[in-house]
């Protein structure tokens, strides 16, 4: 819950998902690996 003293930080899990997707899709085609990472990082921003 976001309050005046505590900022919302739930979006930070997207960075972890991007790093995880890079390793999970390691054996998949290269375009799939980088598209998944890019989607998570763009959602983070």
Image (spheres, rainbow, N blue to C red):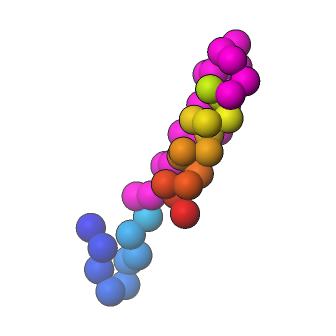
Looking at the image, the residue that sits furthest to the front is 31
Residue pictured at 38% horizontal, 77% vertical: 6
- Can residue 20 be seen in the rendering of this structure? no
Residue 15 shown in magenta: yes
Residue pictured at 44% horizontal, 64% vertical: 9
Frontmost residue, 41 versus 29: 29
Q: Is residue 14 above or below residue 19?
A: below
Q: Is residue 14 left or right of 23 when viewed as pictured?
A: left
- Can residue 45 be seen in the rendering of this structure? yes
Residue pictured at 40% horizontal, 76% vertical: 7
Looking at the image, the residue that sits furthest to the bottom is 4
Q: Position of residue 40 (x, y in %)?
A: 54, 46
Residue 17 shown in magenta: yes
How many marks the image carries: the answer is: 0
Q: Is residue 23 above or below residue 34?
A: above
Looking at the image, the residue that sits furthest to the top is 27
Magenta segment main secondary structure: helix
Image quadrant in which the C terminus is located: bottom right
Q: Position of residue 34 (x, y in %)?
A: 67, 35
Range of magenta residues = 10-31
Frontmost residue, 17 versus 43: 43
Q: Is residue 44 above or below residue 8?
A: above
Q: Is residue 7 above or below residue 13?
A: below
Residue pictured at 45% horizontal, 58% vertical: 11
Image quadrant in which the N terminus is located: bottom left
Q: Quadrant of residue 27?
A: top right
Q: Is residue 25 left or right of 9 when viewed as pictured?
A: right
Q: Position of residue 10 (x, y in %)?
A: 40, 58
Q: Quadrant of residue 42?
A: bottom right
């Amino acid at each position: 819950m976001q309050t005046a003293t505590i900022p919302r930080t739930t979006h930070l899990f997207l960075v972890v998902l991007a790093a995880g997707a890079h390793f999970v899709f390691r054996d998949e085609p290269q375009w799939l690996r980088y598209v998944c990472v890019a989607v998570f990082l763009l959602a983070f921003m």
